Image (cartoon, helix red, strand yellow):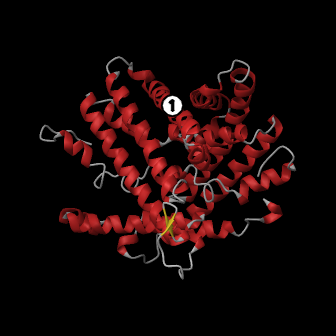
Amino acid sequence: MSQGRGNSLLKECTKGLVKENPILVIMLGLCAALACSTSATDAVGMGIAFSFVMIFSNIVVAAIRKLVPNQVRIPVYIVVISTFVTIVDYTLKAYFPSLSQSLGVFVPLIVVNCIVMGRAEAFSSKNAIAPSLMDGIGMGIGFTLIIGLIGAIREMVGNGTLFGRQVMPAAYQPFLIFILPPGAFLVIGFLLALHRKVMLTLDKPRTQRLKAQ
Amino acid sequence: MISNDLNIFLILFSAMVVNNILLMRFIALCSFFGISNSLKTSMGMGMAVVFVMLMATAVSWPVYHFILVPLNLVYLRTAAFILTIATFVQLEEMFIRRMFPPLYRALGIYLPLIVVNCAVLAAAFLCIDYKLDFGRSIVYTAGVSFGYFIAIVMFAAIREVVDHAPVPALFKGHPIAFITASLMSLAFLGFKGMFGL
């Protein structure tokens, strides 16, 4: 989150992928990540819808950050975010009715997706448009990657397909439980443990800190 | 599927247990994992959610049916609901502080948090999506919020025990919490299909 002088714009973008991944590290936006990941198609659709809202609300919040009085900033952000959410909601309904049907109430709920609000408050309200744009892109990609991964795992193990196409051998008996709600919690639990393992091997100083805990 | 022809007890039961908002529908998970560290705080949060959710539906239902629909402004639903709810939580906070100080001390810090709790907004949306009438909306919301209360209190109780269990280092903290939630959700799945819900 700290924006030192040495940080390039690229770094703002890539930090969302692993180091500050919205789902695995900041642990916000879990509702959508779990509920919309029963199939890879739904998951990627949700990821793209989320990224759109994230990027544009970041840009607008950064653009108006000097005009908005401090006391009313939260309602203003909410209005900005809900505008983009409404755009996404109606676009999906018009052009991708089946996707809109399966994502259901979770599209309008992007408004209260804590990450969008969190990034507006923590990042784009303090930074210029360019870094906010990169932050939005990074968060969007990070979110899409993880939700896509969860969706792919759940669809593959739970149904034997990927993006609707059969990938597992015909003799494979799908574990239906992975499509059902318990599977979502299970997959994300193991992903979190895996992410921790990756972080531990990536930088040693963190290892020490974790051990101290 | 929940609709107006359903018995109100079935609506209540379906919203509370069969389609539990946390474990089966994955709404409001941020607070579920964030606040469930101790039994006491999760009780406070649960009560605050019950209170705010009922009020929020009681306000947002008339806003939708008496203001947005007649004026053809349905596309403003998202913005209108969240602003109504945010304003209303603020009013409630002031009202409770003035009128019921002990309740305020119990719920105080949780009330502002609830504005960003998606469960409140989700319940308001779902009542509209299911096309429920006002009375049934309130019953449905009551079911949803009791379901939230039950799930978060049970989860907090389990987590307090898990904290003392020998968990593999990689799974300490959040990963094991998700696995716990997975098992709880499995238990709630057992209610699926009851009374044809």
Q: How crowded is the residue under tag 1: few (<14 C-alpha within 10 Å), some, or many (20+)?
A: some
The residue beneath circle 1 is: A87
Q: Which of A10 and B81 is in front in this view?
A: A10
Q: At 72% from the left edge and 60% from the top edge, which residue is drawn?
A: B18
- Residue A26 locus on image (x, y percent): 38, 51
Q: Is residue A165 placed above or below B16 in the rendered structure?
A: below
Quadrant position of residue A159: bottom right
Chain to which the residue tagged by mark 1 belongs: A
Quadrant position of residue B120: top right
- Residue A41 locus on image (x, y percent): 49, 55
Q: Looking at numbered disc 1 in the image, what kind of residue is underneath it?
A: Ile
Q: At 61% from the left edge and 39% from the top edge, which residue is drawn?
A: B121
- Count of marks placed on residues: 1
Q: Quadrant of the N terminus of chain A?
A: top left
Q: Is residue A156 left or right of residue B73?
A: left
Q: At 45% from the left edge and 42% from the top edge, which residue is drawn?
A: A50
Q: At 70% from the left edge and 51% from the top edge, which residue is drawn?
A: B146
Q: Is residue A25 placed above or below B136 in the rendered structure?
A: below
- Residue B72 locus on image (x, y percent): 68, 20
Q: Which of A197 and A206 is in front in this view?
A: A197
- Residue B52 locus on image (x, y percent): 65, 38
**Which structural element holds mark 1?**
helix
Q: Which of B194 and A5 is in front in this view?
A: B194
Q: In this view, does A165 lie to the left or right of A24?
A: right
User: In this rendering, does residue B106 appear at all?
Assistant: no
